[in-house]
């Protein structure tokens, strides 16, 4: 009987650990207004941020249905003072009125990930934002 319980316990660990790991590799994100990510702009809507490598240095950003990928973006570790609060932090709006996602966190965690924007990323996001304003559309990706 003890041996049976031990085997059942081991089986439970094998199936539970990957499920817990999956929870710490993706986060569902909702944005109410257009926001920039390095090299692209996300229209208002729902997205999935998924860690793509074991070292947690690249995030894939896709639509909620995973049919459209908006980018594979390098990320860097960051921390916040409290595990409470929003999972997404934005920078202030720039001249085009577009905010950039600065950092993001898994729910209830103090450590998270931040994006680094090159001048090229900022120019591309500004160009997309200007086009969206002139077209009057909500997406241009």
Image: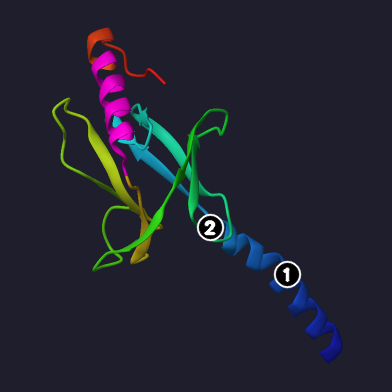
Magenta residue check for 120: yes
Q: Secondary structure at mark 2?
A: helix
Residue 105 higher or lower than 91, as above or below: below
Instruction: Give the residue displayed 27% in from the left and 64% down from the top.
Output: 80
Q: In the drawing, what numbered circle is on residue 14?
A: 1
Quarter of the figure with the N terminus? bottom right
Residue 8 higher or lower than 67, as above or below: below
Q: Residue furthest top?
A: 135
The one nearer the camera, 38 or 105, is 38
Residue 141 higher or lower than 103, as above or below: above
Badge 2: few (under 14), some or many (20 or more) residues near its Cα, within 10 Å?
few
Q: Secondary structure at mark 1?
A: helix
Q: Residue furthest left?
A: 95
Instruction: Give the residue displayed 21% in from the left and 30% down from the top.
Output: 98
| In this rendering, position of residue 6 left or right of residue 25 | right
The one nearer the camera, 98 or 110, is 98
Q: Residue furthest front?
A: 119
Badge 1: few (under 14), some or many (20 or more) residues near its Cα, within 10 Å?
few
Instruction: Please tell me whether the stretch drawn in magenta is mainly helix, strand or loop.
Output: helix
| In this rendering, position of residue 15 left or right of residue 48 | right
The part of the image, by quadrant, that contains residue 99 is top left
Magenta residue check for 112: no
Instruction: Give the residue displayed 62% in from the left and 60% down from the top.
Output: 19
- Magenta span covers which residues? 117-131
Mark 2 lies on residue: 23
The part of the image, by quadrant, that contains residue 31 is top left
Residue 17 locus on image (x, y percent) = 64, 68
Residue 136 locus on image (x, y percent) = 26, 10
Number of numbered discs visible in the structure rendering: 2
């Amino acid at each position: 009987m003890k041996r049976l319980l031990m085997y059942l316990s081991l089986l439970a660990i094998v199936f539970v650990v990957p499920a817990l790991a999956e929870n710490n590799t993706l986060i569902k994100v909702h944005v109410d207004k257009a926001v920039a990510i390095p090299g692209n702009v996300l229209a208002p809507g729902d997205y999935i941020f998924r860690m793509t490598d074991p070292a947690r240095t690249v995030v894939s950003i896709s639509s909620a249905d995973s049919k459209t990928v908006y980018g594979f973006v390098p990320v860097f570790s960051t921390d916040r003072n409290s595990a409470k609060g929003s999972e997404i932090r934005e920078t202030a709006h720039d001249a085009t009125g577009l905010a950039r996602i600065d950092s993001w966190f898994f729910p209830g965690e103090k450590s998270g990930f931040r994006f680094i924007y090159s001048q090229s990323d900022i120019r591309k996001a500004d160009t997309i934002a200007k086009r969206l304003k002139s077209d009057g559309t909500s997406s241009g990706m």
